[in-house]
Amino acid sequence: MTAHAGSQSEAGAESIVQQRISRVVEALASSDQEALIVTPSPDFAYLTGIQPPMMERLIALGITAEGVVRLIAPGFEAEDVAPAAAAGLEVISWSDGQDPAAMLLESLRLGSRPQIAVGASTPMRFPLEFMRHRNISWAAGDDILVPLRMRKSAEERALLKAAAAADDETYRLLLGTTELRGRSEQAVQQDLRKHLQETGHDLSRSFSIVAAGANAASPHHRPADTVLREGMGVLTDFGGPRNGYCSDMTRTWSLGPASTHLKEIHTVVLEANQAGLAAVRPGVTAESIDAVVRGVIEDAGYGEYFLHRTGHGIGLEVHEPPYLVAGDTTVLEEGMTFSIEPGIYLPDELGVRIEDIVVVTAEGGESLNKADRSLLEL
């Protein structure tokens, strides 16, 4: 297939895959790179609609600035790559004993000293195989792909919204149907994972944190045998892929009446979360949102206990650009989607984090998560 901005599929309308490839072609044409090569990864899924497992045998998509597009895969993987062929991609099959690196380079019609951008997840062994055939100057594929993947299409935003709603429902099921008192973090986590599966998440790639009492002071606490008891604050962070696009949400609640200090910290974190949402709009930078959120916590006297960035982009991956942190000067645009998740972590006492997924709209920012953010006393 040769992909240009106006190329058409057999159905007569350009597929989402073809639209994305066309944008890569345009980006390559305005760069110093002659081609982009990606292997199985979220980048590969973004450009092909499929994500086969990474193998020792080469599966790769090549796109050139001239609009030549080829997908190469072992012949016995034909079933896995069939959806990409149906989307209009030309697939080259190879068999053991052949040299797929040479075959792909020849099919892309690249010269002897090409400049090629390579996907960030590509194992080093594959570029080394390509270099046996060409004197290649490699560059980061992120320079081409990150700006495209950060701006979510209407279809992607709909999938992210549905994933966020499923995470909201997961939280409702956890609090409404799970026995909490007298059970370990691990036992509650197992119920949380069951609810993630019930709401349509891919359990094999989902995550969950249940951190009770002082354990919540560790942002990425691994649930253990700590038993949930009356008066404990509990931090729950959970999500993962659902129909390809990810959810991620954190809520902090109390088992029984909350302590005065927990209430105070939760109030500050909630104010920071809402200040961050209010600051979102097209044209501001990612780091400016971090500054607003961090400012609220610093003004309350807890700046040293906010241990991480304010947020991360989300889409095909739970963590992807942009990052809401000092130094990320990405200018926010409509369609960019990321977390806002301030936290305060007091060693040996408690931790509070409130996380929502936010999309940039023409008017500002919209939280995709609707679940109650208040300090529930269960």
Image (cartoon, rainbow, N blue to C red):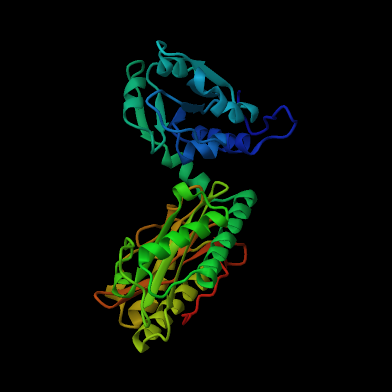
Task: Classify residue 324 as left or right of residue 15.
Answer: left
Pick whichever, 161 or 297, lies toward us. 161
Residue 352 position, x and y percent, is: 38, 74
Question: What residue do we see at 42% from left, 55% from top?
Answer: 207
**Residue 326 horizontal side relative to residue 94, left or right:** left
Q: Position of residue 121 (x, y in %)?
A: 39, 37
Work out whether residue 262 or residue 258 is closer to the camera in this orientation and state it: 258
Residue name at image x 57 percent, y 53 percent: 200
Determine which quarter of the picture holds residue 301: bottom left
Left-right relation of 325 to 175: left
* Picture layout, residue 89 above or below residue 100: below
Residue closest to the far left: 348
The count of marks equals 0
Q: Inspect this view and state whether residue 258 appears.
A: yes
Q: Residue furthest top?
A: 97
Q: Pinpoint residue 99: horizontal percent, then vertical percent.
A: 40, 14
**x%, y% of residue 112?**
39, 16
Among the 4 quarters of the image, the one containing residue 120: top left
Q: Is residue 3 visible?
A: no
User: Which residue is nearer to you in this view: 31 or 352?
Assistant: 352
Quarter of the figure that contains the N terminus: top right
Q: Residue at x 40, y 10 (%)?
A: 97
Q: Relative to 274, say whether 313 is above or below.
A: above
Q: Is residue 37 above or below residue 265?
A: above
**Is the residue 75 above or below the residue 11 in the image?**
above
Task: Spot the residue most to the bottom.
Answer: 260
Which quadrant of the structure image shows residue 272? bottom left
